Image (tube, rainbow, N blue to C red):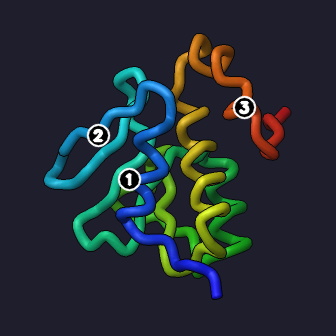
Amino acid sequence: MTHTPTAHDVRRMALPLPETVEKEAWSMPTFRVAGKMFITVPDEQTSFAVRCPRHERAELIAAEPEKFWVPAHEAGSAWVRVRLSALEGLGELRDILEDSWRQAAPDRLLEAHPELGPGRHSASA
């Protein structure tokens, strides 16, 4: 049986990422790299939000609507919500968190940490 990720797992996996700090904003935990937010954990702690380019977000939601969604008030943002209970385990959680970290991290950190560098997602042409 795989472990269903929790909000605690989000924190435990996010904080070791280079130059990541946790800061409360809007009455919820947020995680930032070099001052740029890349994860939020809303109050109910059953989901989290990560950076996601809008063109990729639509594809994610269409492919796995039980896992990914966007609240109406965030429709104009480049963020997507992820339901913790729908994840396939801690490996998938780590991949999603690292992908969001890469989108927010400055080039100097990406260059200094090639093990976190370009994931399986190819850049769109």
Which is nearer the N-term, disc 3 or disc 2?
2
Q: Residue at x 33, y 58 (%)?
A: 41
Q: Which residue is mark 2?
A: 22
Distance (Cα) linking label 1 and label 2: 8 Å
Mark 1 secondary-structure assignment: helix
What mark, if any, has residue 115 been given in the picture? 3
Secondary-structure class at tag 3? helix
Q: Is residue 120 left or right of residue 34?
A: right
At label 3, counting other C-alpha atoms closer than 10 Å, the crowd grade (few under 14, some 14-19, many 20 or more) is: few
Element under disc 2: strand
The relative height of residue 110 versus residue 10 in the rendered view (above or below) is: above
Local packing at callout 2 (Cα closer than 10 Å; few below 14, some 14-19, many 20+) is some
At label 2, the amino acid type is Glu
The answer to the question of whether label 1 and label 2 lie on touching residues, with beta carbons closer than 8 A, is yes
Q: Position of residue 102 (x, y in %)?
A: 60, 33
Amino acid carrying label 3: it is: Glu
Amino acid beneath label 1: Arg
